[in-house]
Image (tube, rainbow, N blue to C red):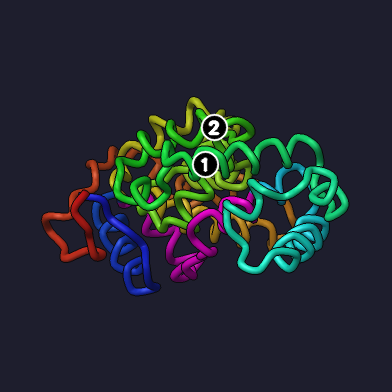
Amino acid sequence: MTIHLNTQADLEDAIGVLVKQDRRLRPILELTGMPVLRQREPGFAGLAHIVCGQQVSTASAAAIWGRLSAAFDPFDHSAIRKARTDRLGRLGLSGAKIKTLKNIARELDAERLNLDVLAEEDADAAHNTLTALHGIGPWTADVYLLFCLRHADAWPAGDIAVQEAVKVGLGLATRPTPKQMAPLAEPWRPLRGAAAHLWWSYYRVLKKREGVLTEKVSPAKVSLAKVNPAKPSLSKSPGPRARKR
């Protein structure tokens, strides 16, 4: 079954399961409080929105997306597929982003890509499907799976904020690489996306502490550094709602 974080209650159920199964997360939650569920629009619009934000500031991304989404009514993959390249460029899209969006639009139009199906797939399989597309890297794929498709097991291994939070929270000597983040998150399957929400909240707590990341704010250093967590199991808790694939 594929688990989805469709509501705040779903996230809270998932966090409850995680802190019971991995005691290292309990002091993290005590510091952060319950994370707030982050969501974006699903479908092609959600993916296009994320592509607009690649490698630009938040303000620039918002401006580009505002112009792009307002220029087409309705805003869908068919409209982008048919749009002239020069028109898209005038709206603020780079040549690379135009190529990415048009390629996604063609794949959807030819029914070689189905974003609704991805929502029901295993997180790793869905990730691989997205990263096989031109211009879609691991970060874009994971953000789309987590925020747009609400996939509870999407794991943004390449997100620097999550990496830094995991480093401090688990008492690691160095910030883990994306490759190292994968085994670190294994204990949190199939709720790695919920764990990511918790780590983002912890990162914000760390940043508020004068922006200094030190060992003294690491719960792992207090008493739980040697805990060997069990893999999360939903059998002992009702957990968040689940859908069959």
Residues tagged 2 and 1 counted as in contact (Cβ below 8 A) = no
**Picture layout, residue 238 above or below residue 199:** below
Picture quarter containing residue 125?
top left
Report x, y in % for residue 222.
Answer: 45, 50
Q: Look at label 1 and name its amino acid.
A: Ala
Q: Nearer the viewer, residue 236 or 216?
A: 236
Residue 133: which numbered mark, if any?
2
Q: Which residue is mark 1?
A: 141
The answer to whether any part of residue 73 appears in the image is: yes
Report x, y in % for residue 84.
Answer: 77, 46
Q: Nearer the viewer, residue 151 or 217?
A: 151
Q: Secondary structure at mark 2?
A: loop
Q: Is residue 173 left or right of residue 1?
A: right
Report x, y in % for residue 185.
Answer: 39, 39
Which one is earlier in the sequence, the residue at label 2 or at label 1?
Answer: 2
Which is more foreground, mark 2 or mark 1? 2
Q: Look at label 2 and name its amino acid.
A: Leu
Q: Nearer the viewer, residue 102 or 219?
A: 102
Report x, y in % for residue 205.
Answer: 61, 62
Residue at (45, 46) in percent of width and height? 220
Q: CA distance from mark 2 to mark 1?
A: 10 Å
Q: Is residue 99 left or right of residue 215?
A: right
Rate crowding at label 1 as few (under 14), some (14 to 19) or many (20 or more) other CA atoms within 10 Å.
many
Question: Does 41 appear in magenta?
Answer: yes
Question: Does 32 appear in magenta?
Answer: yes
Residue 162: which numbered mark, if any?
none
Rate crowding at label 2 as few (under 14), some (14 to 19) or many (20 or more) other CA atoms within 10 Å.
some
The span picked out in magenta is 23-50
The answer to whether any part of residue 213 appears in the image is: no
Q: Secondary structure at mark 1?
A: helix
